[in-house]
Image (cartoon, rainbow, N blue to C red):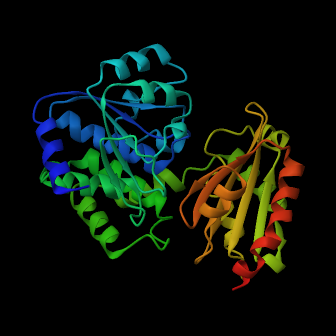
Amino acid sequence: MTEQDIQEIKALLIAPKNVVIIPHKNPDGDAMGSTLGLCHYLIKNHHKATVIAPNDYPDFLKWLPGNDKVIIYESDMSNAESLIEQSHIIFTLDFNAFHRAGDMATSLANSKALKIMIDHHQQPDAYAKYMFSDVFMSSTCEMVYHFIDMLGDTENIDGDMATCLYAGILTDTGSFRFPSSTSKTHLVAAELINKGADHSEIYNAIYDTNSYERLQLLGVALKNLRILPEYKTAYITLTQEELNAANFRKGDTEGFVNYGLSIKNIIFAAIFIEHKQEGIIKISLRSKGAFSVNEFSRENFGGGGHTNAAGGKSDLNLIDTVEKFISILPRYKNTLNS
Protein backbone atom coordinates (compact mmCIF):
# COMPACT_ATOMS: atom_id res chain seq x y z
CA MET A 1 0.00 0.00 0.00
CA THR A 2 1.55 3.30 -1.11
CA GLU A 3 1.70 6.60 0.73
CA GLN A 4 -0.75 8.01 -1.84
CA ASP A 5 -3.15 5.15 -1.06
CA ILE A 6 -2.97 5.98 2.63
CA GLN A 7 -3.63 9.66 2.03
CA GLU A 8 -6.61 8.83 -0.19
CA ILE A 9 -8.02 6.45 2.42
CA LYS A 10 -7.55 9.07 5.15
CA ALA A 11 -9.48 11.54 3.00
CA LEU A 12 -12.24 8.95 2.45
CA LEU A 13 -12.59 8.38 6.18
CA ILE A 14 -12.84 12.04 7.18
CA ALA A 15 -16.62 12.05 6.79
CA PRO A 16 -18.85 9.28 8.28
CA LYS A 17 -19.46 6.38 5.90
CA ASN A 18 -21.50 3.19 5.79
CA VAL A 19 -18.88 0.47 6.05
CA VAL A 20 -19.20 -3.30 5.81
CA ILE A 21 -16.33 -5.53 6.96
CA ILE A 22 -16.17 -9.11 5.68
CA PRO A 23 -14.09 -12.09 6.89
CA HIS A 24 -13.74 -15.33 4.93
CA LYS A 25 -16.13 -18.27 5.13
CA ASN A 26 -15.63 -20.40 8.26
CA PRO A 27 -13.89 -17.50 9.98
CA ASP A 28 -11.10 -18.25 12.43
CA GLY A 29 -9.53 -16.19 15.19
CA ASP A 30 -7.56 -13.95 12.84
CA ALA A 31 -10.60 -13.32 10.63
CA MET A 32 -12.91 -12.40 13.51
CA GLY A 33 -10.25 -10.58 15.50
CA SER A 34 -9.26 -8.40 12.55
CA THR A 35 -12.80 -7.58 11.42
CA LEU A 36 -14.04 -6.79 14.92
CA GLY A 37 -10.90 -4.82 15.77
CA LEU A 38 -11.28 -2.70 12.62
CA CYS A 39 -15.02 -2.35 13.27
CA HIS A 40 -14.42 -0.90 16.75
CA TYR A 41 -11.89 1.52 15.26
CA LEU A 42 -14.25 2.76 12.55
CA ILE A 43 -17.19 3.14 14.95
CA LYS A 44 -14.97 5.13 17.29
CA ASN A 45 -14.24 7.40 14.32
CA HIS A 46 -17.98 7.98 13.74
CA HIS A 47 -18.57 5.56 10.86
CA LYS A 48 -21.53 3.17 10.69
CA ALA A 49 -19.58 -0.09 10.53
CA THR A 50 -20.87 -3.66 10.57
CA VAL A 51 -19.13 -7.03 10.43
CA ILE A 52 -20.92 -9.53 8.19
CA ALA A 53 -19.57 -13.08 8.49
CA PRO A 54 -20.46 -15.48 5.66
CA ASN A 55 -21.42 -18.19 8.15
CA ASP A 56 -21.21 -19.07 11.81
CA TYR A 57 -17.94 -19.54 13.69
CA PRO A 58 -16.75 -21.39 16.82
CA ASP A 59 -18.05 -20.56 20.28
CA PHE A 60 -14.50 -20.01 21.57
CA LEU A 61 -14.46 -16.76 19.54
CA LYS A 62 -17.86 -15.47 20.61
CA TRP A 63 -16.57 -13.71 23.71
CA LEU A 64 -14.73 -11.18 21.52
CA PRO A 65 -15.90 -7.58 22.11
CA GLY A 66 -18.54 -6.69 19.51
CA ASN A 67 -19.47 -10.29 18.74
CA ASP A 68 -23.12 -9.59 19.60
CA LYS A 69 -23.37 -7.13 16.69
CA VAL A 70 -21.99 -9.48 14.01
CA ILE A 71 -24.43 -10.31 11.19
CA ILE A 72 -24.33 -13.92 9.95
CA TYR A 73 -25.06 -13.88 6.22
CA GLU A 74 -26.41 -17.43 5.92
CA SER A 75 -29.02 -16.84 8.64
CA ASP A 76 -29.84 -13.15 8.07
CA MET A 77 -29.39 -12.77 4.33
CA SER A 78 -31.94 -10.01 3.77
CA ASN A 79 -30.38 -7.71 6.37
CA ALA A 80 -26.86 -8.50 5.16
CA GLU A 81 -27.72 -7.81 1.51
CA SER A 82 -29.30 -4.49 2.49
CA LEU A 83 -26.18 -3.42 4.39
CA ILE A 84 -23.94 -4.40 1.47
CA GLU A 85 -26.15 -2.46 -0.95
CA GLN A 86 -26.08 0.65 1.24
CA SER A 87 -22.34 0.52 1.97
CA HIS A 88 -19.91 3.15 0.73
CA ILE A 89 -16.83 1.07 1.61
CA ILE A 90 -16.33 -2.67 1.92
CA PHE A 91 -13.28 -4.00 3.74
CA THR A 92 -12.39 -7.62 3.00
CA LEU A 93 -10.09 -9.02 5.68
CA ASP A 94 -8.07 -12.23 5.88
CA PHE A 95 -8.94 -13.39 2.35
CA ASN A 96 -7.99 -12.24 -1.13
CA ALA A 97 -10.42 -13.83 -3.59
CA PHE A 98 -14.20 -13.42 -3.66
CA HIS A 99 -14.90 -17.17 -3.68
CA ARG A 100 -13.45 -17.35 -0.14
CA ALA A 101 -16.53 -15.44 1.03
CA GLY A 102 -18.77 -18.40 0.16
CA ASP A 103 -22.35 -17.45 -0.69
CA MET A 104 -21.49 -13.76 -0.34
CA ALA A 105 -19.13 -13.85 -3.31
CA THR A 106 -21.66 -12.70 -5.91
CA SER A 107 -22.94 -9.83 -3.76
CA LEU A 108 -19.40 -8.61 -3.13
CA ALA A 109 -18.48 -8.84 -6.79
CA ASN A 110 -21.59 -6.92 -7.84
CA SER A 111 -21.35 -4.25 -5.17
CA LYS A 112 -20.42 -0.75 -6.35
CA ALA A 113 -18.89 0.11 -2.98
CA LEU A 114 -15.20 0.99 -2.85
CA LYS A 115 -13.26 -2.05 -1.72
CA ILE A 116 -10.22 -2.21 0.54
CA MET A 117 -8.41 -5.51 1.07
CA ILE A 118 -6.18 -6.29 4.05
CA ASP A 119 -4.73 -9.79 3.86
CA HIS A 120 -1.57 -11.90 4.27
CA HIS A 121 -2.32 -14.88 2.02
CA GLN A 122 -0.50 -15.63 -1.20
CA GLN A 123 -1.56 -14.80 -4.79
CA PRO A 124 -4.28 -12.17 -4.23
CA ASP A 125 -6.93 -11.38 -6.83
CA ALA A 126 -6.92 -7.74 -7.94
CA TYR A 127 -10.52 -6.86 -7.03
CA ALA A 128 -9.93 -4.03 -4.54
CA LYS A 129 -9.08 -0.40 -5.25
CA TYR A 130 -6.73 -0.41 -2.26
CA MET A 131 -4.76 -3.57 -1.46
CA PHE A 132 -2.70 -4.02 1.68
CA SER A 133 -1.20 -7.45 0.96
CA ASP A 134 1.85 -8.83 2.75
CA VAL A 135 2.50 -12.59 2.86
CA PHE A 136 5.30 -12.09 5.39
CA MET A 137 2.98 -10.72 8.07
CA SER A 138 2.05 -13.05 10.92
CA SER A 139 -1.65 -12.30 10.68
CA THR A 140 -4.26 -9.96 9.32
CA CYS A 141 -4.68 -8.63 12.86
CA GLU A 142 -1.06 -7.48 12.86
CA MET A 143 -1.75 -5.84 9.50
CA VAL A 144 -4.80 -4.00 10.88
CA TYR A 145 -2.59 -2.59 13.61
CA HIS A 146 -0.09 -1.41 10.98
CA PHE A 147 -2.95 -0.04 8.88
CA ILE A 148 -4.15 2.07 11.81
CA ASP A 149 -0.53 3.10 12.41
CA MET A 150 -0.21 4.19 8.76
CA LEU A 151 -3.32 6.32 9.29
CA GLY A 152 -1.45 7.91 12.20
CA ASP A 153 -4.09 6.90 14.73
CA THR A 154 -2.72 4.21 17.06
CA GLU A 155 -3.37 6.47 20.05
CA ASN A 156 -7.07 5.78 19.47
CA ILE A 157 -6.67 2.02 19.93
CA ASP A 158 -8.64 1.10 23.05
CA GLY A 159 -9.03 -2.07 25.10
CA ASP A 160 -11.70 -3.63 22.87
CA MET A 161 -9.67 -3.09 19.70
CA ALA A 162 -6.51 -4.34 21.38
CA THR A 163 -8.26 -7.46 22.68
CA CYS A 164 -9.62 -8.39 19.26
CA LEU A 165 -6.32 -7.81 17.47
CA TYR A 166 -4.26 -9.65 20.09
CA ALA A 167 -6.61 -12.65 19.91
CA GLY A 168 -6.13 -12.93 16.15
CA ILE A 169 -2.36 -12.61 16.38
CA LEU A 170 -2.28 -15.25 19.12
CA THR A 171 -4.27 -17.79 17.11
CA ASP A 172 -2.66 -17.24 13.71
CA THR A 173 0.87 -17.46 15.10
CA GLY A 174 0.15 -20.63 17.07
CA SER A 175 0.76 -18.70 20.29
CA PHE A 176 3.80 -17.02 18.72
CA ARG A 177 5.59 -20.26 17.82
CA PHE A 178 5.29 -20.13 14.00
CA PRO A 179 8.15 -18.66 11.91
CA SER A 180 5.90 -15.75 10.87
CA SER A 181 6.17 -14.41 14.45
CA THR A 182 8.84 -11.75 13.97
CA SER A 183 10.29 -9.22 16.37
CA LYS A 184 7.82 -6.74 14.88
CA THR A 185 4.96 -9.11 15.75
CA HIS A 186 6.09 -9.20 19.37
CA LEU A 187 6.38 -5.40 19.45
CA VAL A 188 2.82 -5.08 18.14
CA ALA A 189 1.64 -7.61 20.73
CA ALA A 190 3.37 -5.58 23.45
CA GLU A 191 1.67 -2.40 22.27
CA LEU A 192 -1.72 -4.15 22.32
CA ILE A 193 -1.09 -5.31 25.89
CA ASN A 194 -0.24 -1.72 26.78
CA LYS A 195 -3.54 -0.66 25.17
CA GLY A 196 -5.55 -3.03 27.36
CA ALA A 197 -5.34 -6.56 25.94
CA ASP A 198 -5.21 -9.02 28.85
CA HIS A 199 -2.98 -11.69 27.28
CA SER A 200 -3.62 -14.28 30.00
CA GLU A 201 -7.41 -13.96 29.86
CA ILE A 202 -7.38 -14.04 26.05
CA TYR A 203 -5.33 -17.25 26.03
CA ASN A 204 -7.63 -18.87 28.58
CA ALA A 205 -10.77 -17.88 26.67
CA ILE A 206 -9.46 -19.40 23.44
CA TYR A 207 -7.51 -22.46 24.54
CA ASP A 208 -8.53 -23.44 28.07
CA THR A 209 -12.28 -23.85 27.67
CA ASN A 210 -12.76 -27.39 26.36
CA SER A 211 -15.98 -29.36 26.41
CA TYR A 212 -15.97 -33.01 27.45
CA GLU A 213 -17.21 -33.92 23.95
CA ARG A 214 -14.31 -32.09 22.28
CA LEU A 215 -11.78 -33.99 24.36
CA GLN A 216 -13.53 -37.25 23.50
CA LEU A 217 -13.30 -36.30 19.81
CA LEU A 218 -9.60 -35.51 20.23
CA GLY A 219 -9.17 -39.03 21.60
CA VAL A 220 -10.83 -40.47 18.48
CA ALA A 221 -8.65 -38.29 16.23
CA LEU A 222 -5.47 -39.45 17.94
CA LYS A 223 -6.60 -43.07 17.67
CA ASN A 224 -7.02 -42.49 13.92
CA LEU A 225 -3.59 -40.90 13.56
CA ARG A 226 -1.37 -42.63 11.01
CA ILE A 227 2.32 -42.09 10.16
CA LEU A 228 4.06 -42.48 6.81
CA PRO A 229 7.73 -42.31 7.92
CA GLU A 230 9.16 -42.61 4.41
CA TYR A 231 7.49 -39.28 3.60
CA LYS A 232 7.87 -37.73 7.08
CA THR A 233 4.10 -37.34 6.99
CA ALA A 234 1.26 -37.94 9.45
CA TYR A 235 -2.47 -37.74 8.87
CA ILE A 236 -5.73 -37.97 10.82
CA THR A 237 -9.20 -38.91 9.59
CA LEU A 238 -12.59 -38.17 11.14
CA THR A 239 -15.82 -39.57 9.72
CA GLN A 240 -19.20 -37.90 9.98
CA GLU A 241 -20.31 -40.68 12.32
CA GLU A 242 -17.37 -40.01 14.63
CA LEU A 243 -18.18 -36.30 14.63
CA ASN A 244 -21.85 -36.95 15.37
CA ALA A 245 -21.04 -39.34 18.21
CA ALA A 246 -19.05 -36.55 19.90
CA ASN A 247 -21.82 -33.96 19.33
CA PHE A 248 -19.44 -32.05 17.08
CA ARG A 249 -19.73 -28.27 17.09
CA LYS A 250 -17.98 -25.84 14.76
CA GLY A 251 -14.42 -25.30 15.91
CA ASP A 252 -14.08 -28.56 17.86
CA THR A 253 -11.32 -29.87 15.56
CA GLU A 254 -9.30 -26.64 15.71
CA GLY A 255 -5.65 -27.51 16.25
CA PHE A 256 -6.03 -31.29 15.90
CA VAL A 257 -3.78 -31.37 12.83
CA ASN A 258 -0.90 -29.99 14.88
CA TYR A 259 -0.70 -33.18 16.93
CA GLY A 260 0.54 -35.01 13.86
CA LEU A 261 3.10 -32.31 13.22
CA SER A 262 4.38 -32.56 16.79
CA ILE A 263 5.70 -36.10 16.22
CA LYS A 264 9.47 -36.44 15.99
CA ASN A 265 10.76 -36.45 12.36
CA ILE A 266 7.34 -35.45 10.94
CA ILE A 267 7.36 -32.29 8.82
CA PHE A 268 4.01 -32.64 7.00
CA ALA A 269 0.63 -33.27 8.65
CA ALA A 270 -2.95 -33.44 7.38
CA ILE A 271 -6.42 -33.96 8.77
CA PHE A 272 -9.34 -35.15 6.64
CA ILE A 273 -12.80 -34.39 8.01
CA GLU A 274 -15.95 -35.77 6.42
CA HIS A 275 -18.71 -33.20 5.87
CA LYS A 276 -21.70 -35.04 4.46
CA GLN A 277 -24.01 -32.01 4.38
CA GLU A 278 -21.71 -30.25 1.91
CA GLY A 279 -20.67 -33.51 0.23
CA ILE A 280 -16.97 -32.82 0.69
CA ILE A 281 -13.94 -33.80 2.73
CA LYS A 282 -12.45 -30.78 4.44
CA ILE A 283 -8.67 -30.84 4.58
CA SER A 284 -6.24 -28.94 6.80
CA LEU A 285 -2.51 -29.11 6.10
CA ARG A 286 0.47 -28.06 8.20
CA SER A 287 4.21 -28.26 7.65
CA LYS A 288 7.58 -27.36 9.13
CA GLY A 289 10.42 -25.66 7.31
CA ALA A 290 10.39 -25.01 3.57
CA PHE A 291 7.80 -27.57 2.49
CA SER A 292 4.92 -25.48 1.11
CA VAL A 293 1.48 -26.85 1.95
CA ASN A 294 0.10 -23.83 0.10
CA GLU A 295 1.52 -25.14 -3.15
CA PHE A 296 0.63 -28.74 -2.29
CA SER A 297 -2.99 -27.79 -1.68
CA ARG A 298 -3.27 -25.57 -4.75
CA GLU A 299 -1.88 -28.31 -6.98
CA ASN A 300 -3.92 -31.19 -5.59
CA PHE A 301 -6.91 -30.12 -3.48
CA GLY A 302 -8.17 -26.80 -4.83
CA GLY A 303 -7.11 -24.79 -1.82
CA GLY A 304 -4.25 -22.68 -0.58
CA GLY A 305 -3.08 -20.51 2.28
CA HIS A 306 0.41 -20.05 3.65
CA THR A 307 3.67 -21.92 3.25
CA ASN A 308 3.21 -23.81 6.52
CA ALA A 309 -0.58 -23.73 6.94
CA ALA A 310 -3.19 -24.28 4.26
CA GLY A 311 -6.58 -25.81 3.60
CA GLY A 312 -8.32 -27.63 0.78
CA LYS A 313 -11.21 -29.94 -0.01
CA SER A 314 -12.05 -33.11 -1.90
CA ASP A 315 -15.24 -34.21 -3.64
CA LEU A 316 -14.21 -37.86 -3.28
CA ASN A 317 -15.31 -39.92 -0.30
CA LEU A 318 -13.04 -40.14 2.74
CA ILE A 319 -11.34 -43.40 1.82
CA ASP A 320 -10.66 -42.31 -1.76
CA THR A 321 -9.43 -38.90 -0.60
CA VAL A 322 -6.87 -40.49 1.70
CA GLU A 323 -5.83 -42.90 -1.05
CA LYS A 324 -5.36 -39.95 -3.41
CA PHE A 325 -3.31 -38.13 -0.77
CA ILE A 326 -1.02 -41.13 -0.23
CA SER A 327 -0.66 -41.70 -3.97
CA ILE A 328 0.51 -38.12 -4.46
CA LEU A 329 3.24 -38.22 -1.81
CA PRO A 330 5.88 -40.04 -3.91
CA ARG A 331 6.06 -36.94 -6.14
CA TYR A 332 7.15 -34.93 -3.09
CA LYS A 333 9.41 -37.53 -1.48
CA ASN A 334 12.69 -35.79 -2.33
CA THR A 335 11.41 -32.45 -1.06
CA LEU A 336 10.01 -33.95 2.13
CA ASN A 337 13.27 -35.75 2.84
CA SER A 338 15.65 -32.97 1.82
Q: Can you give x and y, in whole percent of width and height, for residue 304 in the image?
A: 59, 55
For the C terminus, the image quarter is: bottom right
Q: Is residue 222 left or right of residue 250?
A: right
The image quarter containing residue 135 is bottom left
Q: Is residue 257 visible?
A: yes
Q: Taking 160 as reference, is 229 left or right? A: right
Please state if 316 lies on the left or on the right of 150 as rendered: right
Give above or below for 317 relative to 149. above
Residue 86 vertical position relative to residue 163 in the rendered view, above or below: above
Q: Quadrant of the N terminus?
A: bottom left
> Can residue 256 be seen at all in this image of the molecule?
no
- Residue 119, x across and y down, in percent: 40, 52
Residue in view at x 19 percent, y 30 percent: 47
The answer to which of 198 and 161 lies nearer the viewer is 161
Q: Name the residue at 62% across, 39% down.
A: 250
Q: Quadrant of residue 64?
A: top left
Check the image and report above or below for 316 versus 325: above
Tell me the residue at 49%/52% (across/down): 206
Q: How many marks?
A: 0
Residue 56, quarter of picture: top right
- Identify the residue at horizontal 11%, vertical 30% (top origin): 15
Query: Residue 307 at x, y = what percent?
Result: 55, 66
In the picture as drawn, the residue positioned furthest to the front comes out as 126
Residue 248: percent from left, percent from top: 71, 39
Looking at this view, is 312 or 186 the one in front?
312
Q: Nearer the viewer, residue 139 or 215?
A: 139
